[in-house]
């Protein structure tokens, strides 16, 4: 799989695109926790929505009132 994507990986490895490993590990850990909680769900799209939702900022009180 790496061979198929090597061009994209190599083109991304520029100094301006670096991400800290702590951030990456934190994201991976959060996704693993969501996967454990989602054990038994058969819908992969639902898991993807849960992952995206976990990284969205929390709603403020004014945003909650505006949506009603």
Image: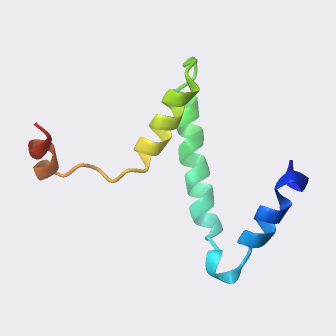
Residue furthest to the right: 3
Compared with residue 23, is residue 4 higher up or lower down, i.e. above or below? above
Q: Measuring 65% from the left and 74% from the top, which residue is drawn there?
A: 18
Left-right relation of 66 to 51:
left
Left-right relation of 1 to 55:
right
Compared with residue 34, is residue 11 higher up or lower down, i.e. above or below? below
Estimate the x, y position of residue 68 in percent, counting from the top left.
10, 36
Q: Measuring 60% from the left and 65% from the top, which residue is drawn there?
A: 22
**Front residue of this view, candidates 16 and 11:** 11
Left-right relation of 15 to 9:
left
**Front residue of this view, candidates 42 and 4:** 4
Estimate the x, y position of residue 57 in percent, counting from the top left.
33, 53
Q: Measuring 80% from the left and 69% from the top, which residue is drawn there?
A: 10
Estimate the x, y position of residue 38 in percent, counting from the top left.
53, 26
Compared with residue 43, is residue 63 higher up or lower down, i.e. above or below? below
Estimate the x, y position of residue 36 in percent, counting from the top left.
57, 30
**Front residue of this view, candidates 35 and 13:** 13
Residue furthest to the bottom: 15
Q: Measuring 10% from the left and 45% from the top, which residue is drawn there?
A: 66
How was the colour assigned to the protein in this rendering? rainbow
Total labels: the figure holds: 0
Answer with the quarter of the image where residue 54 lies: top left
């Amino acid at each position: 799989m790496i061979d198929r994507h090597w061009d994209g990986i190599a083109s991304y490895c520029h100094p301006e695109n670096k991400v800290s490993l702590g951030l990456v590990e934190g994201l991976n850990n959060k996704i693993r926790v969501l996967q454990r909680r989602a054990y038994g769900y058969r819908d992969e799209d639902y898991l993807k929505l849960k992952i995206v939702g976990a990284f969205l900022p929390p709603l403020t009180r004014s945003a909650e009132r505006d949506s009603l």
